[in-house]
Each structure stands twice: as structure tokens, then as C-alpha cells.
Image (cartoon, rainbow, N blue to C red):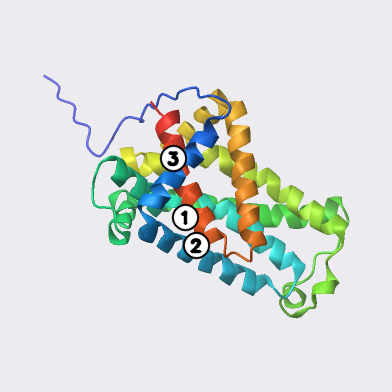
Amino acid sequence: MTTSLSLGKRSFLHVDVRSVAALQSIVWLRRGWDDLRHMERASLAHGVIICVFGAVLLMLGSTHPYLIAAAVTGYLLVGPIMTTGLCELSRRRAARLPRGFDESLDAAARNPDALMHFGGMLALLSVAWFIASTVLLQSTLHLHVPSLAVALWGGAGDFASTREVIAYFSSGAIFAIVVFVLSVVAVPLIIDRHATASEAMWASVKACLHNVPAMLLWAVLIVGLTALGFATLLIGMIVVAPLLGHATWHAYRDLVA
């Protein structure tokens, strides 16, 4: 008689995705706003933290337009992982569980390995974007990229032509699209169903492929609201970040069966 044991192994999490209406993201924002109103203090606390993080990035890059562009684009690329606590608050509200700021931090402890792996993937994509954009500017477009010393200590007028700014943000847009496709339901799936990072990213890809019109509008809304937050010197991000974080949970609930 042969006995087989499988220790420490689990089958790949199968996730079914739903098709949603093209304008469903408007509903997600409305539900996210409702969550924000009902969990005002805890939600806005996360908004303040995210705002401070963005302000630090902008202050570090304020000496040179090249670094400002890097800070803004890098902020967008790692943004999905910053919604973890906000998705947890929405999950807890739906389950009628305590939903203070302290409870929102429980999400990080529920599935830390997957969150760390997912965050690492976003960080790697950010580094890859930074390298790729430098190659694009120097080799393909033959534009000048300042040295680190010049970027840190140089004046704002050293690298601020329209051509450079457009080229730099265009390269960032490509990686932002990749991050969006990989992350649209990743964080909620990780904290709600204990998915691994690879399972969560694959489910996000499936959700995007099944809902192209809805995902296009959702991406436009995210970029537009984030731009509004930056246009208000990040003060608006105190509200925009929680709104998008809560809406991300509702997007997950509609997209994942």
C-alpha cells in the first residue's frame, strides 16, 4: 500500500470573475464615498498618512523636475499597496466588524507574505520603469538626463522642456498600465481570501480582460482623481486616497465571484 502525503502545498486559487457594466466604476466611487462618510476618522487617518508619504517624495524631488516626475510616477506605481488598510475597513464594515484605525492594520498581519511579495513586485516595476525611462530619454530620444548630483542640487530650469516632460511621463504611463492590470483586485483578494501575490495578480488580469470598457473608465477616474489630489498640493489626497481605497474594495466585490 502506498500512502502519499502533501505537506506545505496548496492548489492554485481558482477565481471566477464577473462582467460588469461599462459605467460600474461610478457605482464603486459612490459606495466608496459612503464608506468614507461612515468611517470618517479611520479613513481620513489613512488619507493623512498617504498624503504625508507623497509630500515627502515631492520634497525629496523638488530640487529638479526630473526627480519631481520620478516622485509623482513612482507614487502612482506603488499606490495599490497603500490601499490595504482602506480595503480592510470596507471589508469590516460589510462584515459588521469593528472598524477603527487600529483594526484596519490587521490586514497586514492576516496575509503578510503575499502583501510583501505584491509590494515587492510593485517596487521592482518602479525600478524597471526608472531604468527604462532613462534609456528611453538617452538612447532613443537623445535627451539629456541629469546626473544624481545635478538632480539633487541643480536648479529647476536645468531640465524642464515640454519634450522631456512628455517623454518621461509617457514612459511612466506604460508601466502604470501594467501595474493597473496586475493590481485592480489584487489587494482585496489577498486580504479577503488569503490569495498569494501571483494568484491575486492573475485574477486582476482576468478581471481586466473580461471588462475592458469598465476598466478603461476606472483607470481614467483613478488618474483624474489622483491628479486632482496632486493639483491641490496633496491636500486633496487626504480625501481622494480613502475614496479610491474604499472604491477598490467594491470593485473587487463586483468583479470577483
- When asked about the image quadrant of residue 198, the answer is top left
Asked whether residue 127 appears in the rendered view, the answer is no
Tell me the tag on residue 82: 1
Closer to the camera: disc 2 or disc 1?
2
Q: Is residue 134 above or below residue 210?
A: below
Alpha carbon separation for disc pair 1 and 3: 19 Å
Closer to the camera: disc 2 or disc 3?
3
Identify the secondary structure beneath mark 2.
helix
- Residue farthest along the top direction in this orientation: 1
Closer to the camera: disc 1 or disc 3?
3
Identify the secondary structure beneath mark 1.
helix
Quarter holding the C terminus? top left
The amino acid at mark 3 is Arg
Alpha carbon separation for disc pair 2 and 3: 21 Å
**Which residue is tagged 2?**
50
The amino acid at mark 1 is Met
The amino acid at mark 2 is Ile
Image location (x, y in percent) of residue 118: 46, 48
Image location (x, y in percent) of residue 23: 57, 29
**Which residue is tagged 3?**
31
- Residue at image location 50% in from the left, 48% down from the top: 244
